[in-house]
Amino acid sequence: MNAISRLATVISVASLFPLAILPLSVSAAESKGSVEVVHWWTSGGEKAAVDVLKAQVEKDGFTWKDGAVAGGGGATAMTVLKSRAVAGNPPGVAQIKGPDIQEWASTGLLDTDVLKDVSKSEKWDSLLDKKVSDTVKYDGDYVAVPVNIHRVNWLWINPEVFKKAGIEKAPTTLEEFYAAGDKLKAAGFIPLAHGGQPWQDSTVFEAVVLSVMGVDGYKKALVDLDNAALTGPEMVKALTELKKVATYMDQDGKGQDWNLEAAKVINGKAGMQIMGDWAKSEWTAAKKVAGKDYECVAFPGTDKAFTYNIDSLAVFKQKDTGTAAGQQDIAKVVLGENFQKVFSINKGSIPVRNDMLADMGKYGFDSCAQTAAKDFLADAKTGGLQPSMAHNMATTLAVQGAFFDVVTNYINDPKADPADAAKKLGTAVKAAK
Ligand code: GAL
């Protein structure tokens, strides 16, 4: 059964529990309506970012019901969302990404009407890149509002730690990365802060695949899911390098949250972290300045590529008009110029609006964000702009889960063989498609 029909089957059970028999969200007397928003922005820096949205929505007269579900990468939030949908009680708004937006829309639970007027009056079609708007439209109708764009293939560096370890510059090749890792180890630092949760393992895996296999190889294997690319010699090489990268990972990082690992780089215990630019939200919350207190560089060998991750808020069908008005308010706020600026500065991302991406200096974005925007626009022209597998932009959750299992088992098995792991990838992905 493919991923779409799998979700549809689960959700069809929801028809046994029609919305009408469930208590509707009760708005406070003075509120224009109440909207629950399910998301997984729970680290210190991320919370600061989402609080910007909450404050504006409340200022506009709506009641914000916070549906935060802890767990980086969102796997737990997605499990909660599915069970809420099955119980016939989905929230008004939920953070859903990439192909899963289509999957959810095909169940009939997303609202294809509620964003019609706001998307027209706010001119979303001209504000957004087609790649972005296609992701959040179902059959031509907006069913989600894109919030921001994250770049995933970053390496975060504490330059003071590098200096203490005698490393002169940020690594630009895997060989330089290993050399830096050796020096950090010798000087008593954790070379690579890393939390061994499956989504974090796969964030590193996809960066290494991009570095070793290049943009075309990445696309064939992780986006097109081509069996020959998944199991071929280039993938075996990428998996071999991944095992080497793993030797520099934090020994205490098993099961650790990404933000706690980021903190180790921020407070000078570790030298580097491979993480998307939500990591910057933690540096910002710690009042650190890009280019001075920390460096952001593309993961070695991937500077001509940009693995993208678009956060989006999808709208679920609801019975009461107050919630619909709240959904529309959220949508309008989210794509507004001021919110796009303030949210992304807090979150570490870049705006989704084309006009802002082209003029980042004007909005006071730091050097990391300016590089990200420049690369996003340049890589869109060359094909270097690719959806992140680890962040659910390239595949459905089912296929992503197949990658996660094989990659995490491979990293953790001391006897694992790269050729064997590549074969397993091919088989697991085929079964999940
Ligand atoms: C990503 C998400 C980001 C950030 C990160 C860590 O998948 O797009 O916004 O929340 O997970 O949880």
Image: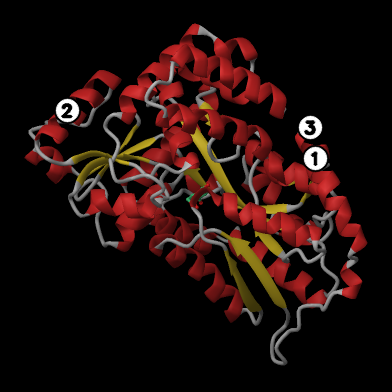
3D distance between C-alphas at marks 2 and 3: 45 Å
Q: Which residue is mark 1?
A: 6
The x, y position of residue 138, in whole percent, is 79, 44
Amino acid identity at mark 1: Arg
Q: Sort mark 3 into few (<14), some (14-19) or many (20+) by Cα contacts within 10 Å.
A: few
Amino acid identity at mark 2: Asp
Can I make out residue 378 in this image? no
Residue drawn at the location 50% of the way across and 24% of the way down: 384
Looking at mark 2, is its residue's CB closer than 8 Å to ligand 1? Answer: no
Q: Which residue is mark 3?
A: 2
Q: Earlier in the sequence, mark 2 or mark 3?
A: 3
Residue drawn at the location 65% of the way across and 82% of the way down: 61
The x, y position of residue 32, in whole percent, is 72, 83
Residue drawn at the location 76% of the way across and 73% of the way down: 323
Which quarter of the picture shows residue 56?
Answer: bottom right
Farthest residue, direction top: 233
